[in-house]
Image (cartoon, rainbow, N blue to C red):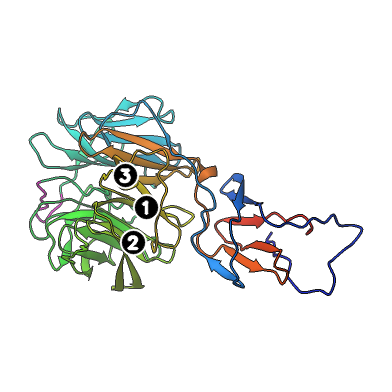
Amino acid sequence: MQYQPMPLSRKAEPFNHPGWLLEIKWDGFRCISVKLLSVIALVMLQLACFEDVVHSKSTKQKVASGTWQVASTTTPSTTSFFAIKHSNNEWYVSDRIQGFFKSLDNMKTWQPINGNLPAGTGGWTIQVDQNTSTLVIGTLDVGGGSSFYYSNDDGNSYAQIKPTGNFHITAVGAHSGCIMPANLGDNLSCGGYFGSANTSQFYSSNMGQTAAVGGYTPAVASVLGQARNPNDGSYWTGTENNGIFRSADQGKTAVNVFPWQQGPPTNGDTYFLTFDNSGNPVISSLGGVWRGVGSGNTYSWTNTFTNTAQGRGIYTDSSGTIYYGHRANGLLHSLYCSQDSGQTFQPCDAGIPNSLEVYHMEENPNDGNMYVLAENGQTNAATIYYLNVSQRWVGRENFFERERSPDPNWHYWNVGASASDQLVEAPPRGRR
């Protein structure tokens, strides 16, 4: 059910009726109920000032916020990535030193799942295919370099992915991990950096049993980040100094849609990419956040958030809020959020020390909470934090519409409806 605010109109005399209890509301607090997934929360907004604007709209209202909490005190100390299997809330982490682990009790205890991997193999990334439960891991190999493996038995054993076409990286896999298939039969796409021309990314239609190197135009030697655009299914790649690429065939071929900007600001070293609700790309790079507006392979780009620290993770949750982390800088917040599709950002890191760098982020559909991995860039010590669903930022755009009454003593906040986040205004005293 959707509720519409009572229209405002000028009357010759104040309204009065025996069935109504009336009280002038000069200012103070108003309350709205917020329904997000299965959780209902009451949120109060303090009206500190009023503007003489009729129907002025704001896209920056912070509906609800909270403090990030430590999700687990038993997580391996140098965790570099995490993944969640949606079907049973099974957790997985990769640890730079100890390898790979899983938890069946919501991160209370962890079991090693290094299977038949070579002794001493470190963990870089771990991901799970939600369609088949296949695990895909990126390793830190003994002696240097990185490899990719898949497991069909929850980490008891692994098979190495060996793409045709001279796949070759000398450092590590992409910070973002691989692009996992959204649907059964879609391609897996993985990459890494410091290779040579067109040897640093591969795709597979069978979760790594067979794979082939993808082709980039122009050629690319380092793949630092990858992401799938949920609006059109295209696969995107961020590079070290070759710009941003888009693939319309799930990683087989890709074309440049944002050439390298030497800067400042630069779009180099793009570790993570995400998309707003309209499918526009928002990327995290050495020069901060860039936002593209367009379609297909044609976009106009704007550097919307520049700071002195290299961008790390960037993620869009189900409400449309975009989260952005960056390299540690004691003068900056550790995490910023945007509710206007990446056009502006505000701090949202309460509970996360500003000495940490936020990398991988993921929303858990089992509890609706947001989870982020925050690392110490000097020691690689890492902690997973969560933000409770009832404290999440909700809303997408233009939810709040301020209306000024003909009577200067009355001011109302009218709340619009959204298909994803249902916000209903609690009627003020004197209105039903």
Specify the amino acid type for callout 1: Tyr
The magenta stretch is 163-170
Q: CA distance from mark 2 to mark 1?
A: 9 Å
Q: Nearer the viewer, residue 422 or 303?
A: 303
Inspect this view and state whether residue 356 appears: yes
Instruction: Specify which label sits upstream in the sequence, 3 or 2.
Output: 2
Whichever of callouts 2 and 1 sits on the residue coming sooner in the sequence is: 2
Quickly name the residue at label 3. Answer: 358
- Answer left or right for 122 relative to 74: left
Percent x, y for residue 259?
19, 69
| Element class at badge 2 | strand
Quadrant that contains the N terminus: bottom right
Q: Main secondary structure of the magenta part?
A: loop
Quarter of the image for residue 124 reads top left
Q: Is residue 411 above or below residue 327?
A: below
Residue positioned 50% across, 51% down in the render:
393
Q: Is residue 424 left or right of residue 322?
A: right
Label of residue 282 in the image = 2
Q: Residues within 10 Å of mark 2 (few under 14, many from 20)?
A: many
Query: Within the image, what quadrant is residue 300 found in?
Result: bottom left
Q: Nearer the viewer, residue 245 or 72?
A: 72
